[in-house]
Amino acid sequence: MTPSPAAPADLVITDCTALLHSGGDERIEFAEDASIVVRGGTIEAIGVGVELPDAVERIHARGQLAMPGLINCHTHAPMVALRGIAEDLPTEEWFNDVVWPIESNLTAVDVELGARLACAEMIRGGVTCFADHYFSMDTVAAVVEECGMRAHLGEAYFSSQGPQGRERSLEFALRHRGGADGRVTTALAPHAPYTVDDADLAATADLAREHGLPVHLHAAENRDQTDASLARHGLTPIEILARTGLLADDLDVLIAHGTGIVERDLPVLARTNGRTAVATAPRGYLRFAWPTTTPVRALREIGVPVGLATDGAASNSSLDVWESMALTSLIQKSTEGDPRWLTSRQALHHASLQSARAVGLGERIGSLAPGRKADVILVDLTGPHTQPVHDLAATLVHSARSSDVRTTIVDGRVLMHDRELLTLDVPEIVRELAERLPALVDRSHGRRIQEYDPT
């Protein structure tokens, strides 16, 4: 009896160079003339000489490099609607005079349009997954389901909202956990220790344990916050998180920024045994003229994963994780006074496996290997700015650009092919958003959703 032929694969990519993790933390290698077979949203086979089945869809990728999709480990996606509206301001004025007055105008429609535009920007820049911390997150979850991205979502809250804020964050996390065919994961999302009191932080820790949820929040964003916390409480923001039960070896916590992490915080973070991660978004720190940056080297030495991020476009003007990768490498060299740290291979590791671990998906995404989710981007390296190639890792980190991404694939589904977005209509999004902007940016009402006072 003749065996029945195997069903066609969903997608086959041929003739690419593939970025592979060969073991060890920075062991990255490149396989030329590689192929990738995708079935059921998962990589079935990858490498040189792979047997190629029939496929529903084929992509010939000669001259292109296949690598894991980038992960934006901390952003506020809908804030693209505020891109460029609060420039050249110190942190306190940025929050109190512009951003928080405008955010008091937010409607679900504004959040939806901002999320759509942000997802379009990220897909075109090779971002396949993002960790979002914002308001009206039911709307963001719906956009993620529609456009095909992967996301780690949390409904932000302040203590000034009363217990209802924390309850909404929990309800959102439970309602959407595992949504979009498993592409959505969720977290509890208190804003920060200076806007969420100790009682709420402790309650968040209890809820996280009870429901098996991670926590995503801002803490020790800059050195001023750390100094103010020490003056008022005798504790750093990191120590406050530990005191309230959030930093422990039985909770997964993602801390945004951490440029105010100091030496005394390191043993506290080390005791979490890798369950705490930090997201670094260096462009925003430069724009705010913060005197320190995320201490990546010190965090790596104690086993804390550091993922790459952009923050919101209101502070960064961009959701370009490619740029975050290059800036992280360069700023760390300058800060450490050592051109050997961070190397290009180390930067690629932060952009891939470290970022995947930071958002709690280290076993599913972040590398190209059989059994991993097929979150893949194809990068064109034939342009004059990427030639000649002497060191492929250095070319990717310091020469390639987000605009070199030709194709973006999430869960085996092609979201952009040859620079054409397939799931979002950018001109229509921009048209609708333009109609909303006058009402959104009006500050004449004098309201704020919160007061920025890091003390």
Image: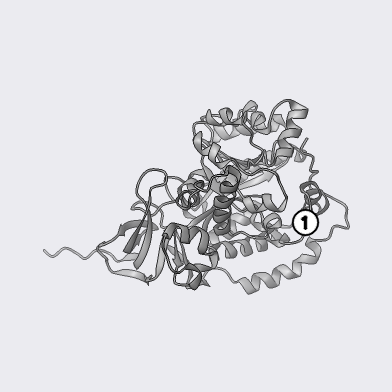
Q: How is the image coloured?
A: one colour
Q: In the picture provided, is 99 more to the left or to the right than 360?
A: right
Q: Nearer the viewer, residue 237 or 38?
A: 237
Residue, x 69% and y 33% (percent of image)? 200
Residue, x 37% and y 60% (percent of image)? 18
Q: Nearer the viewer, residue 368 or 205?
A: 368
- Which residue bears the numbered disc 1? 88
User: Can you see residue 405?
Assistant: no
Residue 159 drawn at (x, y percent): 74, 37
Question: Element type at marker 1?
Answer: loop
Label 1 neighbour load within 10 Å: few <14, some 14-19, many 20+: few
Residue 165 drawn at (x, y percent): 71, 41
Q: How many numbered marks appear?
A: 1
Residue 440 drawn at (x, y percent): 78, 61
Q: In the picture provided, is 177 more to the left or to the right than 222?
A: left
Q: Nearer the viewer, residue 10 or 317?
A: 317
The N terminus appears in which quarter of the rendering? bottom left
User: Can you see residue 249?
Assistant: yes
Q: Nearer the viewer, residue 318 or 203?
A: 318
Which quadrant of the view contains residue 57? bottom left
Residue, x 55% and y 29% (percent of image)? 248
The C terminus appears in which quarter of the rendering? top right
Residue lying at the far left in this picture: please name it.
1
Residue 61 drawn at (x, y percent): 38, 70
Question: Given the image, on which type of amino acid does mark 1 rest?
Answer: Asp
